[in-house]
Amino acid sequence: MRPEEAYKLGLIDWKMFVNLQSQECDWEEISVKGPKGESSVLHDRKSGKKFSIDDALRLGHITNPQLQQYVNKEITIQEFGVMVSGKI
């Protein structure tokens, strides 16, 4: 059973879910220049996948208060990566 399934079924709590996910992912924040200017992207170095923070906001994977928590270092990049990737 994948961590996402266990969390959704209530078999593990949020902290355990993030802990298990952090074993599968290695997150880093990078800046990318595009046609709309510079934007921040979370890159999972293990899978090679990149997730736009702007897209995550637009799609409802994260909220502005959650983004501010990450910016203020109130949540870890691992926890933020789970949110931005839409794995829950």
Image (tube, rainbow, N blue to C red):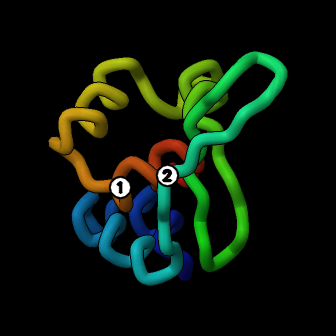
Q: Is there CB contact under 8 Å for labels 1 and 2?
A: yes
Residue 37, quarter of picture: top right
Q: Identify the disc placed on residue 29.
A: 2
Please state which of the two labelled residues, at mark 1 or mark 2, is closer to the viewer: 2
Q: Is residue 71 left or right of residue 78?
A: left
The residue lying toward the viewer, choosing from 3 and 84, is: 84
Question: Is residue 11 placed above or below 86 in the rendered structure?
Answer: below
Q: Residues within 10 Å of mark 1 (few under 14, many from 20)?
A: some
Question: Is residue 69 placed above or below 58 in the rendered structure?
Answer: below
Mark 1 = which residue?
Answer: 77
Tell me what residue is drawn at x 51 percent, y 73 percent: 25
Whole-percent x and y of residue 77?
35, 55
Q: Residues within 10 Å of mark 2 (few under 14, many from 20)?
A: some
**Farthest residue in the right direction?**
35
Q: Secondary structure at mark 1?
A: helix
Whichever of labels 1 and 2 marks the residue nearer the N terminus, that label is: 2
Whole-percent x and y of residue 80?
39, 48
Whole-percent x and y of residue 33?
72, 34
Q: Secondary structure at mark 2?
A: strand
Q: Identify the disc placed on residue 33.
A: none
Q: Amino acid at mark 1?
A: Ile
The residue lying toward the viewer, choosing from 47 and 86, is: 47
Whole-percent x and y of residue 62?
46, 30
Q: Is residue 9 left or right of residue 14?
A: right
The residue lying toward the viewer, choosing from 36 and 42, is: 36
Question: Is residue 22 placed above or below 72 in the rendered structure?
Answer: below
**How many angstroms separate mark 1 from mark 2 (CA)?**
8 Å
Residue 74, quarter of picture: top left
